[in-house]
Structure formats: C-alpha cells, structure tokens
Amino acid sequence: MKMKNHFLYIALVFVGLFVSCKKEEVEKPKVTYETTSKVKPQVAVDSNQIEVADLPINMEGTNFLIHPIGVMSSKGKGIKSSYDSEESFTVSNYGEYQITGYLKNLKFQEIGKDTIYALTDKQILIETATYLKTVADKSKQQLLVYSLTDMDTNKDGKLDSNDIKSLYISTISGQKFTKLSVDFQELIDWKVIESKNLLYFRSIEDTNKNGEFDAEDSLQYHFINLLDKDWKVNRYKPI
C-alpha cells in the first residue's frame, strides 16, 4: 500500500510539473520590462536558417513584382519552412490582394527592370502585406499595408507571433516604408473607409506594465488620410 502511495505521489508531482510548464508557456508575456528605456532589443542571426524567395507576385494594375522572402530551417531531416507545417520550399501564400506568411522581408522589382531591392534592412517578421486595390481604383494611390513584428518585445531572442504586432504602410514599390502604430502597443485591427480614403486602426497599450494586454489596459484609436503625403497619424476618442 505504501508503495502504491509512493508511485501515486511521484505521478502527481510529474503531472503538476507538466501543467505548470504548459501554463508558463501559455502565459508567457508579450512584453518583458527589464529597464525603463525603450531600446529595441536585438535579435541574433540564426545560422541554421536559409533564406528562400517564392516566385514573384504582381498585384493587378501595378507595375511592380513583389518577391516574398522567408526562411527555412536546415535542422533535422530535410528543410522546413517557417510558414508551412510540412516540409516545403514555400514560404508565403497569396490571395485577395494579400500576401501572408512569416516573412523576413519583401523585395521589389519594377517590371522591365533588373534591379531588385529590399523593403527594409531591419529585422522584421511580416505576417500580412495587403494591397489597397479599391483605394487605388478610386484615388490612384497604390499602397501596401503590413502587419508585422519589428521588436523582440518578450526578449526570448527571436521574432515570432509571441511578440507585439505593429502596423506599417508603404507605396506599391516598397518605398516610404513607415510605421503607423506606436512602439510597445499591440495592433488589434485596421480597416479602410474607401469613400473617404481613410485608414483606421486600434491598438492597445500595456498601461499597467504587467507584460500582458487585457481589459485593464488602454485602447488607443487612430486614423490616417491615405492621400496625405506624410501619412500623419491622428488620434481620436470614440468613447
């Protein structure tokens, strides 16, 4: 009987440790505050990652090719992309004027020219790049809007979906790559009011500095005029 109790105790300890580990993994904060300075944490380059470019994409009505750039891991058997769960050389997906994936960069090429150049030289992780087709049809402004990660906010040494997501914009050529959301504020969503050429977005600020975004934090509301050359961000208060 004592032996059974002993094994039961050991089993409960292991279960407790497992649950604790899983809970810690799930509840890992998106922001880790080590100092009061807001210096963007640096991410080390992973030598096991191999850059791969998908075949180029041409958004309808534009004169540029977009080359999605992702990474693949050379660890283990074969090569595995950061986007596909299966072993694959594909790093992105395209549909409805939107490129999706976990992309290290985008490269641009004007049709008829040989030069290919990068969107940015900074470390980022692009989740979506959306062409504002309806805005282009009405205002002739050919723009791309991005949701991406640009900081290792939880300081785990890598950029991934566990870090804060930000909102950016650029021209269809990749020029004027501009951040719209504020550092250390998590992007919630965005939408375009086509008739007014306005882009609205919401973000949330970790006002209580607990590393999580929850009901105790402050929602921030912003908009920009897409026809504005400088894309000035304006705050508004609907509530």
Image: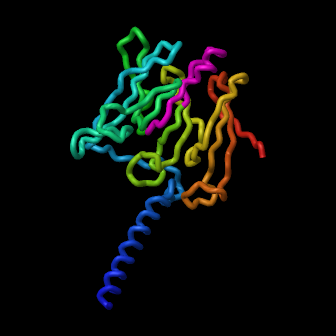
Residue shown at 41% from the left, 17% from the top: 109
Residue 30 position in % (x across, y down): 50, 54
Question: Which residue is most to the top?
Answer: 112
The residue nearer to you, when weighing 236 against 131, is 131
Q: Is residue 187 above or below residue 206?
A: above
Question: Which residue is most to the bottom?
Answer: 2
The colour scheme used to paint the residues is: rainbow
Residue shown at 62% from the left, 20% from the top: 134
Magenta region includes residue 10: no
Residue shown at 39% from the left, 77% from the top: 12
Residue 212 position in % (x across, y down): 56, 57
Q: Is residue 106 above or below residue 208?
A: above
Q: Quadrant of the N terminus?
A: bottom left
Q: Is residue 186 above or below residue 180?
A: below
Q: Is residue 215 left or right of residue 143?
A: right
Q: Is residue 129 above or below residue 166?
A: above
The residue nearer to you, when weighing 19 against 202, is 19
Quadrant in the rendering for residue 9: bottom left
Magenta region includes residue 141: yes
Residue shown at 55% from the left, 34% from the top: 168
Residue 7 position in % (x across, y down): 31, 82
Quadrant in the rendering for residue 139: top right
Question: Which residue is most to the left?
Answer: 77
State the count of labels.
Answer: 0
Q: Is residue 222 left or right of residue 174?
A: right
Q: Which residues are magenta?
A: 125-145
